Amino acid sequence: MLLPRASTPPLSCPVRGRAKLASRRSCVASWRKRALSTGVLERWFGGKVGFTVRIPRVPASRLLGARLCNVGGQKIPLASYDRQGRRMSLFAMGPATSDADEGCQEGVRGFTLCRRAAAGIEYMLVSDYPQAEAKQLLIAALSPQDSR
């Protein structure tokens, strides 16, 4: 199994008034410094992919940012999280198929990959957590949440 690679520019942010940013990198940094709202990111993805993107809340973690990745010519949303100093990436792979793989694999280029479908979308969590812990994080993140 190959890991997705981000090859498109990160999420852009608006420039207001006469403020100018030196580069897109400055823009990304400003997004990461602010508290990110899942709703803002979900709306940003609207219309950019062929499905409704939900940015899950991963337990005991902080949302760092999001971007649209090009994986094999397909646009794949990615949300990045920090959990106790460890980074995790959650990809929304697209509409789930009936044969969607819902398992976990350890040791894929040094990472654990877990896949699971929720609300008709297939998600993939990439982390350095052991398989059992990564699976529980993904299940908890994708469970229905009342306070969105």
Image (tube, rainbow, N blue to C red):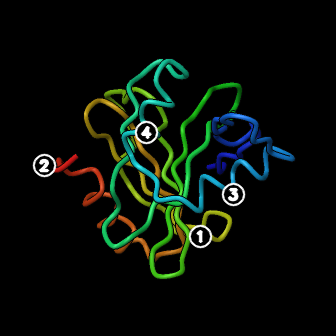
Nearest to the eye among marks 4 and 1: give it: 4
Query: Given contact means CB atoms under 8 Å apart, are the residues at marks 3 and 1 in contact?
Result: no
**Quadrant hosting residue 99:** top left
Q: Residue 36: image x %, image y %?
A: 46, 53
Nearest to the eye among marks 1 and 2: give it: 2
Query: Given contact means CB atoms under 8 Å apart, are the residues at marks 4 and 2 in contact?
Result: no
Answer with mark 1 or mark 2, whichever residue precedes in sequence: 1
Work out whether residue 98 or residue 75 is closer to the camera in this orientation and state it.
75
Residue furthest to the left in view is 146
Q: What separation in Å lies between label 3 and label 4 (alpha carbons)?
A: 16 Å
Q: What separation in Å lies between label 4 and label 2 (alpha carbons)?
A: 18 Å
Nearest to the eye among marks 3 and 2: give it: 3
Instruction: Give amino acid for label 1.
Output: Gly
Answer with mark 4 or mark 2, whichever residue precedes in sequence: 4
Q: Secondary structure at mark 4?
A: helix
Instruction: Give amino acid for label 2.
Output: Asp
Q: Which residue is mark 4?
A: 40
Q: Secondary structure at mark 2?
A: loop
Q: Which residue is mark 3?
A: 29
- The residue drawn where x is 55% and y is 22% is 48
Q: Which residue is mark 1?
A: 107
Q: Which mark is residue 146?
A: 2
